[in-house]
Image (spheres, grey):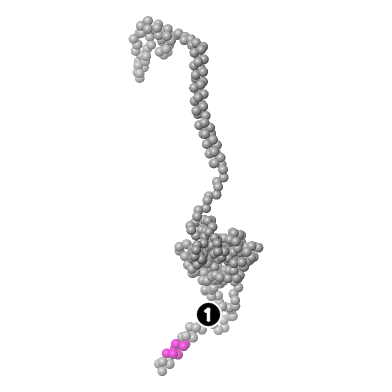
């Protein structure tokens, strides 16, 4: 009997813990912004008509924490770029990648995706700077660096 | 009005030298008349220099001066050239300083270790030739990664 009573108490406590939500019955529909969320920031480079052979850039944010680094959209830069592991759980990272093969991309291409942990609803502020870019022969070239927050793929659960 | 020594001598008058600091004059002992006459004769006599002697002295002086200038002329020329060179050097635009080598991993000698150094070695490994290759290809590939890691290394203190 005591065991049954103990199990029942635990079940009720578990239900309260897992199912208690800010919105109560009768509350208006709509989501409440979580205190902590994760966003993805896509980094693009546009070397113009020249083929991109290598790049090195810096990302810096005091409002976001870096939690992951992905590669780009082209096969040449699909692997994650080089970065210092100390950058994880921090707000600053240096990324570098190169491709010595023949299929280097030209034109605007996503070279990396950064996964960031953000607190609050506002988009985090950040700065990016292109240190150097080179063509397939290793010659320095000009390239435009841009960044965009990736669109969320459905509701995160 | 006090007379100087020369005026007194010409006027054949005793010279009264003033005592120092007191302004009190005391008469000197008079010179003998014969001495006075002899001295006057020496200083009043006009010495005539023969023309030949004058010319000889003049020519010798000119030769001496010319030889002195001849010795100094090269030095003067060097000094002038040095001044001109210094002036040109000061006014010339400062050339760009030579880029310091950033170490053995700065393969392209641009003064810093970045992705271009790793990329350079990676292309040499791909092509099988280059000045930075060793006899061990595996070691060269590891060096590519090492250089790239060095290029992205954050300073001490982490990423914050």
Q: Name the spot of residue B99 as percent of width and height, x first.
A: 52, 53
Magenta segment boundaries in residue numbering: A6-12
Q: Is residue B25 left or right of residue A13?
A: left
Task: Tell me the subunit letter for badge 1.
Answer: A
Q: Quadrant of the N terminus of chain B?
A: top left
Q: Name the spot of residue A27 as percent of width and height, x first.
A: 57, 81
Q: Is residue A87 visible?
A: no
Residue placed at 51% from the left, 58% from the top? B106
Pick whichever, A131 or A30, lies toward us: A131
Pick whichever, B121 or A83, lies toward us: B121
In the image, is residue A153 above or below residue B15?
below
Q: For residue A104, what is the image quadrant?
A: bottom right
Residue placed at 52% from the left, 60% from the top? B132
Disc 1 target residue? A22
In the image, is residue B53 above or below residue A142?
above
Magenta highlight on residue A10: yes
Q: Is residue A76 visible?
A: yes
In the image, is residue B130 above or below residue B6?
below
Pick whichever, B13 or B84, lies toward us: B84
Magenta highlight on residue B108: no
Q: Residues within 10 Å of mark 1 (few under 14, many from 20)?
A: few
**What main secondary structure does the magenta stretch of the protein show?**
helix
């Amino acid at each position: 009997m005591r065991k049954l009573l103990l199990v029942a108490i635990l079940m009720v406590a578990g239900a309260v813990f897992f199912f208690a939500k800010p919105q109560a019955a009768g509350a208006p529909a709509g989501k409440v912004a979580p205190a902590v969320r994760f966003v993805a920031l896509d980094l693009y480079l546009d070397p113009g008509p020249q083929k991109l052979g290598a790049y090195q850039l810096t990302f810096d944010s005091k409002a976001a924490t870096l939690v992951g680094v992905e590669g780009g959209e082209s096969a040449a830069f699909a692997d994650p770029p080089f970065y210092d592991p100390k950058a994880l759980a921090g707000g600053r990272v240096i990324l570098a990648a190169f491709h010595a093969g023949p299929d280097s991309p030209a034109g605007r291409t996503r070279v990396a995706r950064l996964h960031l942990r953000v607190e609050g609803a506002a988009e985090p502020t950040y700065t990016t700077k292109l240190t150097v870019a080179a063509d397939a022969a290793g010659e320095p070239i000009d390239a435009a660096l841009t960044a965009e927050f990736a669109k969320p793929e459905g509701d995160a659960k | 009005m006090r007379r100087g020594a020369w005026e007194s001598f010409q006027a054949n008058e005793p010279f009264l030298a003033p005592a120092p600091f007191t302004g009190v004059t005391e008469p000197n002992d008079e010179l003998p008349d014969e001495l006075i006459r002899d001295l006057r004769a020496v200083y009043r006599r006009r010495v005539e220099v023969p023309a030949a002697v004058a010319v000889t002295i003049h020519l010798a002086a000119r030769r001496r001066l010319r030889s002195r200038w001849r010795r100094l002329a090269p030095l003067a020329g060097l000094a002038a050239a040095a001044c001109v060179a210094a002036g040109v050097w000061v006014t010339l635009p400062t050339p760009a300083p030579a880029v310091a080598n950033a170490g053995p991993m700065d393969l392209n000698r641009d003064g810093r270790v970045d992705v271009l150094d790793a990329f350079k070695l990676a292309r040499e490994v791909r092509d099988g030739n280059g000045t930075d290759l060793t006899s061990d290809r595996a070691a060269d590939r590891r060096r590519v990664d090492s250089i790239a890691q060095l290029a992205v290394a954050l300073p001490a203190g982490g990423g914050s």
